[in-house]
Structure formats: structure tokens, C-alpha cells
Image (tube, rainbow, N blue to C red):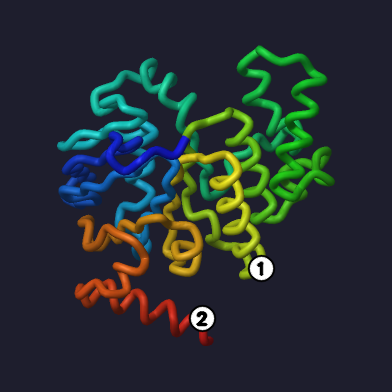
Amino acid sequence: MATNPQSAPYIDFQHVSKAFGDHHVLQDVSFDVLAGETVCILGRSGVGKSVALQHIMGFLKPDSGRIIVAGEDITDYSEEQMEQIRKKVTIVFQNGALFDSLTVGENVAFPLRERRDMDEQQIFQVVDGLLEMVGVKEMRDLLPSDLSTGMKRSVAIARALAARPECVLYDEPTTMVDPLMAQLLGDLIKRVKIQLHLTSIVVTHDMRLAKKLADRIVFLHEAKVLFFGTSAEMEKCPEPIVQEFLQLDELTLEA
């Protein structure tokens, strides 16, 4: 579903601000995501990256500004109206948010059963295909408590894809996993994008992941957008904070 750059963005943040009491989490934040594009929201912990995703899902409302998702201005949407948007846009939470009492296979089947347009045999085939795609097919009958953090995230991605979304939001997909698992998850997210032509936003503080996945990067610092562009453009960005972030990442790579 990739489109040319002249078309309207799939997601458009227009001068969005959000504060909790006196704490400004987002201040006049603007960026857009084209259909079929992957945008990474980068920055240190606590700069409002995940809050941006919660606005796209309608879990939070902005104090000012407008938010366009799937061509609709969702800023003032009711919960009922947001349910329709959430059929197109889904989120993979940091903790996976899997149902503890359901097996891996049942977790992935859940959105398929919600739709009620497939019989059990079809559901079984789709679940198997998705679990194979994310590399955890042999774990179909295990419970989430039997899985590592990284495996839970792989299953959460499979469950998100079962809903047949147009857009997937990933909240810190490589946090708290070992480097090998982080690499596997990054490869998986990239493969999903290429195979399914999905629009994606990846919230991360992992520069390596951003370089691997991002068509464009939003860099947030102290509630504001310091940079928005490609990773190549980011390397030439004159902002000292951005350069410091890039250099720290290089040090981490060499460590």
C-alpha cells in the first residue's frame, strides 16, 4: 500500500502538545508518516515517545494540535469511533500484553475469532502461518509465562498481524532483550514491512534499530522535535544533542 510522496500522509501529527500537570511531555510536535513508510521515534527515556503512540491509538487526547490517522482527524473522536480506527492501526506493547491464560496459538487466534468471518480450520492455518513467519511455530501450545521477553514480543507481533492492520505501532520492541534477540526482532519488523507493505512507527532509543528500519527518523528531546528526516540527514544534523546521541551509540557499539 505504499504511495508516492505527493499523497496525503497516513498519520499526521500537527502541532501536538500534551502536559500532565506542569510536566510538558509533547510541545508543538509535528511529523507525518506516509503509507507504507516506517518512521522511528528516537530519543532518551521519558521524552514522550510512547505518549505519541498513545495519542495515535486514542488512549490519550492532545491539549492542542490535531492528529490525523488513516485520513481521518481523530482528535475529538469518541471511544466508539476510535474502535473503527483500531481495526486499521494496532500496537505492539513493550510487555507484549498477551493473555496469560491463553496459549500462544490462542493468543494469535483471538483477533481472528473476534472477526467471526473464518471457520476453525482457516483460523488454525492462519495462526500456523503467522507463528512460522515470526519464528515461534513450535511454541504454539505454550503459555506466555513459558516464553522469554523476546519470544513474547514475537508472539505479540503475530497477534497484531492477525488483525490484518494497515499500520503497526511498535513500542520499544528491543528493550530488555539480549543483543541477538534484538537483532532478530529488528529483522522480523523489517521483513513484515517488506512482505505486507505495512505503515509502521517504531518507538526506540536504539540507534542501530532505527538505522535498520527507518525511512525517516523523528528525534525528540525535552518534549520537542529536534530533528525529522532520514538517518543520513541525521548524521549531518548540527544539533549538539543529536550528535551526542549518535556518538554515544557508536561508543556502545565498540564496547
Mark 2 or 1, nearer chain start: 1
Q: Quadrant of residue 12?
A: top left
Whole-percent x and y of residue 84? 43, 19
- The CA span between labels 2 and 1 is 14 Å
Q: Secondary structure at mark 1?
A: helix
Mark 1 lies on residue: 180
| Label at residue 152 | none
Query: Relative to 223, does residue 125 appear above or below in the rendering?
Result: above
User: What amino acid does circle 2 point to?
Assistant: Leu
Whole-percent x and y of residue 153? 62, 49
- In the picture, measured across the screen, residue 218 lies left or right of residue 253, that is left
| Label at residue 253 | 2
Q: Nearer the viewer, residue 15 or 22?
A: 15
Instruction: Tell me which residue sits at (84%, 46%) in the image.
Output: 138
Say whether marks 2 and 1 touch (CB < 8 Å): no
Instruction: Tell me which residue sits at (66%, 13%) in the image.
Output: 117
Query: Relative to 77, does residue 65 appear above or below in the rendering?
Result: below
